[in-house]
Image (cartoon, helix red, strand yellow):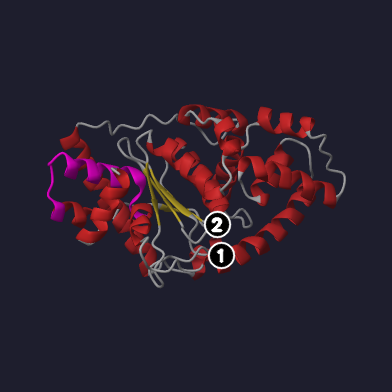
Amino acid sequence: MKKIRDSRSKSMVDESPLSSALITEFRLCENRRKRALELAEILDKVTFCNIPATTIDADVNQVGKELSRFLEIDFDSIRSFKEDSDVLGYWIDRVEARSILVFRTHTHTGLNPSYKEIRGVSSYEDEYPWILINSQEHPRGQLFTLGHELAHLMLRSSNLCDLNEDDHSDSVRYERFCNQVSAAALMPRKIIEEWIASHSMKFRSDEEIEKGISLIQKKTHTSEESIARRLVTLGFISWNDYNLVRDKSIHNLDEDRKKLGNIPAGEYYYKRVMRWNGRKYTNLTAEAFIEGKISLGRASELMSAKIPIFNKIISKLYQ
């Protein structure tokens, strides 16, 4: 298994060895990448990823701008979405269009690493780098994790992350930088400042801060904590204000996770299989099957799904 730097908080690294569920996810991601490269070769697809490179000393606003420009994000389209999951899907589509594989953890009981253990993983490669996002997170949290892991790829690093900045480990500087880049990419300075001006937002009290964050959240579909972080870096609120929002946000996210739970099995199981495998990997497998490059049995094997489930996936993609 490829060596990936453990950038989690020191207390987590010291007290918690990697779970078997997380190690399994690593191996699944590595295997999918290998198979994706094989499928891309027989389908004559581009596998090289030219995501811009950066350094830890770079300006986070500029790096965030470069990232959203590289992905060709249409922020007007984002404002038209109603569901957080649709916005997350839009960002993932833009990321995978740039030859970056995005996977999400399993949602079966006992198979999914805890969100306390892992929020995201990034593995940099010249061809098909990959990102793993923990499915236990709310879509808004998953979106922020996606931006964070993209920042690691821009640093040309492979990392295991919990996005925690609260201790004094050597990784904190990198985690803080990636958090700031994620916030800058998801919420560009110009757009945020225009929204604040157009809505005459003020941030003089807790109530005004909460109202302002709520308005921004409806447009960006990002988490309260990430919005507060952005407002700090843009000079609208203080770090003390941020910490108050963060504490409340952590509580709200914990409640959201309890509501999410484990998605029940049923007629939409095929959608879960597609999510675990990622859209790009799923599309490569399906296209290879449709073009007669691989058999139905092999395609089902690549997706780790039974043939009836793979048939539903084909019906969904080519309906």
Instruction: State left or right for residue 285 relative to residue 99.
Output: left
Of 161 and 72, the residue lying toward us: 72
Instruction: State left or right for residue 102 relative to residue 117.
Output: left
Residue shown at 25% from the left, 52% from the top: 31
Q: Locate residue 250: give its quadrant.
A: bottom right
For residue 283: magenta? Answer: yes
Tag 1–tag 2 contact (CB < 8 Å): yes
Q: Residues within 10 Å of mark 2 (few under 14, many from 20)?
A: some
Of 245 and 5, the residue lying toward us: 245
Type of secondary structure dominating the magenta stretch:
helix
Where, quadrant-wise, is the N terminus in this rendering?
Answer: bottom left
Secondary element at tag 2: loop
- Is residue 5 depicted above or below 18 in this figure? above
Residue shown at 51% from the left, 33% from the top: 55
- Is residue 299 depicted above or below 45 in this figure? below
For residue 230: magenta? Answer: no
Q: Residues within 10 Å of mark 1 (few under 14, many from 20)?
A: some
Q: According to the image, label 1 marks what residue?
A: 257
